[in-house]
C-alpha cells in the first residue's frame, strides 16, 4: 500500500490558492482512477483505491498547512506505513511555474507543511515539488501562495500539469522519479505554454552574472588602411588612423 498526500488548507476560501496545488493534484488522481468519495478520518479527507493494481490511499490533511504532519502521522501509524511508502505533493516557490522536481528525502526548504511532517514520520518519503513561481520579493510570498491561480496560469500550465500527474501517478508508486519529471515537463511544454516568458530562476529579481562577451574574439581583424602620402586627404587620414609623420 502507498500513501499519496496532497498538502493544502481546508475550506472554500483557500480552494483555488497556489498553496493548495497539492490538494488539486490528489483530486485529479482520484478522478482519473475512479477513487470513491473522500471521507473524514485521521484529521483529514481520505480515499482508498487502486492504481496499476496497487492499493493506494489518497490523503488531504484538514489540519491547515502548518499541522499537516498530525494527519499524515495518524494514517501512517494506523496502516503501518514507513517513509518509503509515502509521497507528498506540495507547492514550491523556488521552482518556476509548471516545473516539477521529485526526490526522496532532503530538507523542508522552508515549507511549513514539510516542517510539520518531517519530525513525525522521518525524512525518507518522496517529495513531489510543484513549482508555482516566486513573487519577486520575500515580503510578497505569503500573498502569492495564498492567492488564486489566474485563469491564464490555469490554461497555460496548471491544468495540463494536473492531468499529467493523474495520468502518470503509477510512476510515483514505482519510484520512477526521472520518468515522472520527464512526462510532466513534456505535458506542460506541449500545451503551448510560453516558457520564454517564465523566469529562469525562482526569484525573477535575482540577477545572474553576465556571460563573458566573445564579440571581440569573433570580430575579424581590421584591414590595414593605405594612407596617401600627400594632400588634404592624407592629413585627415593620418589623424584618423594615428599615423605619425
Image (cartoon, grey):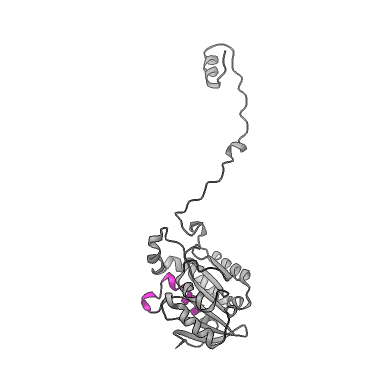
Q: Is residue 160 magenta?
A: no
Q: Quadrant of residue 185?
A: bottom right
Q: Nearer the viewer, residue 207 or 53?
A: 207
In the figure, 81 relative to 92: above or below? below
Majority SS type along the magenta span: helix
- Residue drawn at x 52%, y 48% is 209
Is residue 34 among the parts visible in the rendering? no
Residue nearest the observer in this picture, 86 or 23: 86
**Residue 166: x percent and y percent?**
55, 77
Which of these two is toward me, 9 or 215?
A: 9
The residue stretch that appears in magenta: 10-28
Location of residue 63 in the rendering, given as x and y in whole percent from the top left corner:
42, 80
- Residue in the foreground of this view, choosing between 83 and 23: 83
> Which residue is found at the position 55% from the left and 64% from the top?
189
Q: In this orientation, does residue 105 appear?
A: yes
Q: Position of residue 98 (x, y in %)?
A: 51, 66
Is 190 situated left or right of 111 in this image?
Answer: right
Whole-percent x, y for residue 61 in the image: 45, 80
Q: Is residue 239 above or below residue 118?
A: above
Q: Which residue in the rendered view is the most extreme toward the front? A: 119
Q: State which quadrant residue 65 falls in.
A: bottom left
Q: As displayed, is residue 204 above or below residue 92? A: above
Q: Quadrant of the C terminus?
A: top right
Q: Is residue 231 above or below residue 41?
A: above
Magenta region includes residue 17 = yes
Give me the residue at 39% from left, 66% from top.
Answer: 142
User: Which quarter of the rendering shows the N terminus?
Assistant: bottom right
Amino acid at each position: 500500500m502507498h500513501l499519496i498526500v496532497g498538502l493544502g488548507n481546508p475550506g472554500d476560501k483557500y480552494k483555488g490558492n497556489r498553496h493548495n496545488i497539492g490538494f488539486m493534484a490528489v483530486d485529479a488522481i482520484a478522478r482519473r482512477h475512479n477513487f470513491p468519495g473522500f471521507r473524514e478520518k485521521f484529521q483529514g479527507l481520505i480515499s482508498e483505491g487502486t492504481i496499476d493494481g496497487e492499493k493506494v490511499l489518497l490523503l488531504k490533511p484538514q489540519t491547515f498547512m502548518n499541522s499537516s504532519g498530525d494527519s499524515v502521522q495518524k494514517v501512517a501509524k494506523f496502516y503501518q506505513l514507513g517513509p518509503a511508502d509515502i509521497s507528498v505533493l506540495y507547492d514550491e516557490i523556488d521552482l518556476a511555474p509548471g516545473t516539477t522536481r521529485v526526490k526522496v528525502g532532503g530538507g523542508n526548504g522552508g515549507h511549513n507543511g514539510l516542517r510539520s511532517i518531517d519530525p513525525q514520520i522521518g525524512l525518507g518519503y518522496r517529495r513531489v515539488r510543484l513549482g508555482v513561481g516566486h513573487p519577486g520579493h520575500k515580503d510578497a510570498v505569503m500573498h502569492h501562495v495564498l492567492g488564486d491561480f489566474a485563469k491564464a496560469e490555469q490554461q497555460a500550465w496548471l491544468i495540463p500539469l494536473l492531468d499529467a500527474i493523474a495520468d502518470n501517478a503509477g510512476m510515483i508508486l514505482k519510484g520512477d522519479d526521472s520518468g515522472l519529471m520527464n512526462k510532466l515537463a513534456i505535458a506542460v511544454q506541449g500545451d503551448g505554454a510560453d516558457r520564454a516568458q517564465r523566469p529562469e530562476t525562482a526569484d525573477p529579481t535575482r540577477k545572474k552574472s553576465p556571460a563573458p562577451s566573445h564579440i571581440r574574439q569573433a570580430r575579424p581583424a581590421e584591414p590595414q588602411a593605405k594612407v596617401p602620402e600627400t594632400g588634404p586627404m592624407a592629413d585627415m587620414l593620418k589623424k584618423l588612423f594615428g599615423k605619425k609623420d
